[in-house]
Image (spheres, grey):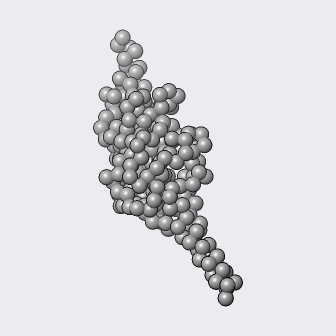
Amino acid sequence: MGQPNLSLLLVLLSFSTVTVCYPTGAPISACETMMPGHVGIFPQPKPAPYIIKTNSSSVKSGRPIQVQIVGPAYRGILLQTRTFAQTTLFGKWLQPPNNTKILACPKNPVGAITHANTNLKDQSTTYLWMPPDSGSPPVLFFIATVAEAYDKYWLGIQSAILYQYSVETSGVISGSIETSGANEITWATTIFTVTFLQFTKSLLF
């Protein structure tokens, strides 16, 4: 009787590992890929039912930015700040809200935030991000993997672009931004606008 019971226990433990994989946060391997590592489960097609809302569209050293995930209640989250064509994580996350924690990624131990359990989170959950003191690129964006359930998640949800604070950008871009896709057309248009303003300023002065 002992041997069959042991075999049954091993099977149940194996099943449990697959069905509740990473209930206490994304794995370190997700720092670059942002894949949650759910065995046999693939991302949901876009567009995602979530948008990333921020209380600012410009980045200024020493000024934190509030971030919220707006949409259906969710259980899993991996949230980072990046720039185009890079996996570098910029800035640091402060004071993780309830049911979340910092994910200590190898190249930036405070550059990612994830869930601490599978309790439901909603748009009242507010994340606080602090820009880097130096070395920040001209444009940044928040990017997230959001899991509504173990077998239902969306990959690569992006916020609107965040621009380095300056006199020019503060006059062009302001207010809270809500979007599910920071796109290169918007980026190029705004960069052109800022460049044009700088050019005009040089002619006048």
Residue 177 position, x and y percent, is: 34, 43
The residue at 50%/62% (across/down) is 23
From the viewer's perspective, tell me whether residue 22 is left or right of residue 131.
right
The residue at 35%/61% (across/down) is 72
The residue at 43%/52% (across/down) is 100
Residue 85 in sight: no
From the viewer's perspective, tell me whether residue 136 is left or right of residue 49.
right
Picture quadrant of residue 172? top left
Vertical arrangement, residue 19 with respect to residue 145, above or below = below
The residue at 62%/72% (across/down) is 14
Residue 97 position, x and y percent, is: 38, 49
Picture quadrant of residue 197? top left
Residue 37 in sight: yes
* Residue at far left of view: 175
Considering the image in quadrants, where does the N terminus appear? bottom right
Residue 47 position, x and y percent, is: 43, 58
* Residue at far top of view: 205
From the viewer's perspective, tell me whether residue 192 is left or right of residue 33.
left
